[in-house]
Amino acid sequence: MRRNLTQLLISLMFFLFPPIFFIEKGMAQNTTIPVKVGVVLDLDTWIGKMGLSCISMALSDFYASHGHYKTRVVTKIRDSKRDVGAAAAVVDLLQNEEVEAIIGPGSSMQANFMIGLGSKARVPIISFSATSPSLSSLQSQYFVRATLNDSAQVPAIRTIVQAFGWREVVLIYVDNEYGNEVVPSLTSALQEVDTHVTYRSAIHPSATDDQIVKELYKLMTMSTRVFIVHMLTPLGSQLFTKANEAGMMEEGYVWILTDGITDFLSTLDASAIDSMQGVLGVKPHVPRTKELESFKIRWKKKIQEEYPTNEISELNIFGLWAYDAASALAMAVEKLGAGNFSFQKTTISRDSTSLESIRVSPIGPNILHSLLGTRFRGLTGDFQIIDGQLHTSAFQIVNVIGEGERGVGFWTTENGIVRRSNTTSKANLRAIMWPGESTSVPKGWVFPTNGKKLKIGVPEKKGFCEFVKVTRDPITNKTKATGYSIAIFDAVMATLPYAVPYEYVPLKIRDRKAAGNKDELFQGHVQKCDALVGDITILASRSLYVDFTLPYTESGVSMIVPIIDNRSKNAWVFLKPLTWDLWVTSACFFVFIGLVIWTLEHRINEDFRGPRSHQVGTIFWFSFSTLVFAQKERIVSNLARIVVIILFFVVLILTQTYTASLTSMLTVQQLNPTITDINELIKKGERVGYQYGSFVYEFLIKSMKFDESNLVKYESPEELDELFSKGGITAAFDEIPYMKIFLAKYCSKYTAVGPTYKFDGFGFVFRKGSPLVADVSRKVLSVTEGAKLLEFEKAWFGQTTSCPELTSSVSSNSIGLNSFWGLFLIAGVASFVALVACITTFLYENRNALINLNPPSSLWRKIKAMATRFDDKDPRSHTFRKSDQLPDKGHQSHGCSYSLASYTNFPPSPSSLLIPTHSDFAFFGEQGTPSSGHGDPVCPNRPMSPHILFEYELANLNHEQTRPPVIE
């Protein structure tokens, strides 16, 4: 019986097992893995309600479109109860619900504690509404900010302020963690574009209307009219309502909103919007898409179903970020896969809330890693987490007009301000309506309404009072400032298009060992005064903490030295106009020209003949007498005339240059400086002066490398003259405006020598970021370009003197050969060509005499014979020829031509006639030379012509060379 029962049970199990196996297998294939995710929000606030509904819709939409996914995010919702229950809710979710991630909290103040718990449990904390800059991902890698940091909008605001050129702003912010934490980053960002935060107005979150009005009236008494507001809508709506009532929404005011109010403009009532007309605001840019419009419709329907009795608010950016954050988390979980999720039972009680027993999630780090790598196109645009925070894409710039807002442009990290978000064109913003329905850009500042005058500091000085002079009325004790700088400043301020009340305040420069540098004015007094006026030089080092206007006078540093008069002490000054090489070259040149003229004129001009000593004297006399054009000799040769014309031109150039140079030396030589080389001062360790209170002291030490012990200060022109007179200093360094004043008084004793080290000149000083700088600079140009500047210079500096310019040379250098070598070359070549032409003509016309000489004749004998021939007169020259002696054959003499053929009655063979046949030939003496007492062999009745005598000498030479030697 028992055996039959056992067989029956086995058969029944075998029959039922296959269906059960296949049913369980099918159920396993259709089962999804739930992943618990906690949600901690303030469910009593609109942000909490909106965020929860968006999270629910995000998960529903995600799994509806991805039904085949194996994982499912299951939310475990807890109410933080206005910060009180946030920590307990997180502990409960981590310990009892064993969640793998948490979405929340709703505020930044709740996030600090939650971040610590998430790090301990290794569970990602994902917030879509905690925007405080202090909640950095660097505190914990498990904190993911799926929203924008409040500081992300700071660059956009800075760019707007910079684009409109506003130099001063006032920050108005809520006095809590939300407001305080963005102020430092906003202040430093504005300083980067030279915009100064003149005042910070912190308003308590629960401030009354009277407290707000009191603060607004304080702001009205200030000059700044650009206000940046960082707070949330309840307090912001209250602030603008009172500002409108106080008249601070009129023309001239500028209001810029952060996204704390701009994101919620659509939720404000009509009265609040009406009080905000003309306001600018920035908010994260959300592209308009069909998906977004469809979601808004569905969300509005859902929220009305969930809260039918409550007043419905509009969907804002935080709801969209909640939707994208939930979608991103669902994607990250699915990317891990169902196999990564295995649940282990813990021994911890379900009711445990002990911090020491918090469960550590085994898959939390994997979810975090997957979430950080998730990228997709969400409702707010491209969703991407970089460094634990949502990546900033763009901000929209809106203008409150009419019943709402109107977009006027965008700001992107890549292109700055653009008109359209999908372009890179940096066009201007669309037309903006400013407060007071004005279309012109407000300048951002006005003079305060409290009647306060600007304090203009002026330095008190002992010397150089032409620029600034401070006096006090002994009766009223009022300060009066006068001078060149004061006159220009008064003229500039008078031309401004608005009234600027100001008063002068005297400033004393403390006596410091480090030269009393005027920089102390900027480091100390500039904080007490609104501006500084005086002889203040624009320097790059000073511009780091003050603003300068454009310069109203030139400047530069140069050296002043005494001058000496060497004119009466130098007996050889007449030699200095020309250098020694030019003197020697000129002397040699004139001697050469004299020799050429003598060569060309000797045979045809009686003025160049005579005893040898007389002829040598004639050469030198003619050469140097041409310097004063005192030569008396006639010039008859055409070649000589050409040479003389060129000589006269050379003489004219040399004498005129010499005269001008000598004149310059005799007049300018008295301005010869005692020293011209700055390096010589440094090398010898000479003592030099500088003006007390000037930057020149540091310039000499740091730039010029002077020893500090060799620097001597002075405060007035009289003191500087005394230092020079007593030998206390060798030179002084000062700025050009002061040098002009000093030299105007002591023009005959001192001079300025280069080089001049350029600086930007004198300018007016204002506080860093002062809005007056631009307007004053423009008016400085108009004043300095007009006739008023000349009037001021004449009034304070007097008539200009005849002192040499600072840049003029104080010495006249000698003129060297390099300036005249071309002139000498031309004259030398012309003279040489004339000389060669003369000698060549002479040799050519007497070639027969040279050819008939016996070959054994030595070269020296031939040269000597030709020289003797050249020394004779040229009988064919018109200066010697007489009509009864020499027939006119049509020849014209050039001073060098002569030929025996001109005598037609001479025997055709001179050699046969002149060679003697016996020793007692009456014509020759005992040594074979013609006797001076005999006449011409052709015409015995007349004396022998010197030309015929020359032919006899040549024949005698040939005879002596061919006569056989006598054998004794």
Image (spheres, rainbow, N blue to C red):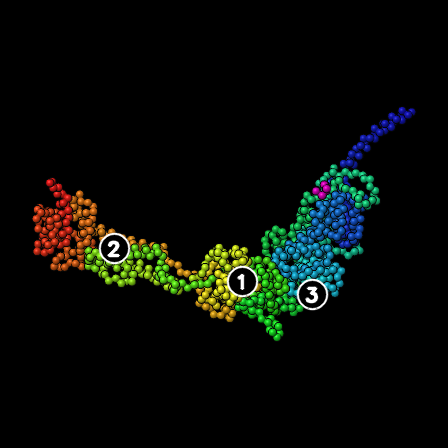
**What SS does tag 2 mark?**
helix
Q: Of label 1 and label 3, which has the lower sequence position? A: 3
Residue drawn at 29 percent across, 57 percent down:
590
Residue 430 can be seen in this image = no
Q: Which residues are magenta?
A: 365-370
- Disc 2 to disc 3, how far (Cα)? 103 Å
Residue 366 located within the stretch drawn in magenta: yes
Residue 75 located within the stretch drawn in magenta: no
Q: Amino acid at mark 2?
A: Val
Quadrant of the rendered structure where residue 537 is?
Answer: bottom right
Residue drawn at 78 percent across, 39 percent down:
343
**What SS does tag 1 mark?**
strand
**What SS does tag 3 mark?**
helix
Residue pointed to by mark 3: 218
Would residue 835 be found to the left or right of residue 408 on screen?
left
- Disc 2 to disc 1, how far (Cα)? 68 Å
Judge by depth and name the residue closer to the eye, 304 or 866: 866
Which label belongs to residue 596? 2
Quadrant of the rendered structure where residue 505 is?
Answer: bottom right
- Disc 1 to disc 3, how far (Cα)? 48 Å
Residue 560 in the image: above or below residue 117: below
Would residue 742 be found to the left or right of residue 375 on screen?
left
* On-image quarter of the N terminus: top right
Residue pointed to by mark 1: 713
